Image (spheres, rainbow, N blue to C red):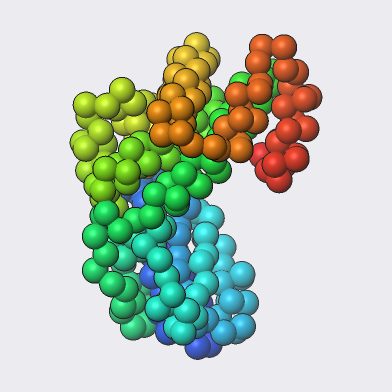
Amino acid sequence: MLNDLKLIIEASRKGNCKSVVMFGSYGKGEGAIVKGNPINDIDLLLVDADDDVLRAFNGITASAPLDITLIKTEDIPTILPVQQWWEIRYGSILLDGQPLKLPDWKAWEIPYWDAVESINKRCVSMIIAKHEMMKKDGSAKKVLTQIGKAVIALGDALLIKRGKFDHRYSVRALMLMFDDIATDYRVAVSHKVLNEPELNPDELWQMWMRTVNNLREYAFKNELVIDNLDTLLSINETTTKEEIAEIIKQLGAEKYL
């Protein structure tokens, strides 16, 4: 990990780049490192990075994938306190350059529509998980990763609607401890940041079903129209693996097949 950070800083100095900020699991101090290597993506924000810097980043061979977000200084005042920018504001580390100046947002300022959009996106993750479970050689870790994304999105929506949110997964899990999804949320977070626990096929199927039901109930209670949830709910026991693969392609997620 230290070598990755060294390579990142070196690349940022190959040209002009105002700021290099690490956010995500490692920015908030919750990312896991196994045998010296990160197991999560390394999320980076580059401010005013020129072409020389971007070429340098393309040439980095890191021990984990680099997920890079680009922004220009003049666009910063237009940023809304959506979940990603909230986490960058409160759960990030400046690796090089000038500190990023964002407002002191409050939890109740996070727009609820952002939480709903996240649920819509993660319904696709649930469809991907279903397809992976139907494979003879399907990966249990891949299945749990995709289900976990939906569980976290649902838990975060609960908190955002209440005007409560925190950049740390551990704190969010505590705030959800009395909700029905508390156990699944803890499992999803543990898998995301620690790559554990491992669930057997029956446990994965049960978690998938619980999550589908929780998503359906949440949308009904809040009178939400969520397009990808409707697509998810259209899948039943007669839907074939091939039909689900076609749905995934239509949703633009064919890279997960």
**Residue at 52% over, 59% down:** 67
- Quick check: 122 left or right of 167? right
**Residue at 45% over, 59% down:** 43
Residue 183 percent coordinates (x, y): 31, 24
- Can see residue 61? yes
* Image quarter in which the C terminus is found: top right
Camera-side residue: 146 or 225? 225
**Residue at 49% over, 25% down:** 216
Residue 221 percent coordinates (x, y): 40, 28
**Residue at 74% over, 22% down:** 241
Residue 151 percent coordinates (x, y): 42, 33
Numbered marks: total = 0
User: Measured along the vertical axis of the image, is residue 211 above or below residue 50?
Assistant: above
* Image quarter in which the N terminus is found: bottom left
Residue at the bottom extreme of this rendering? 16
- Quick check: 236 left or right of 119? right
User: Measured along the vertical axis of the image, is residue 20 above or below residue 156?
Assistant: below
- Can see residue 124? no
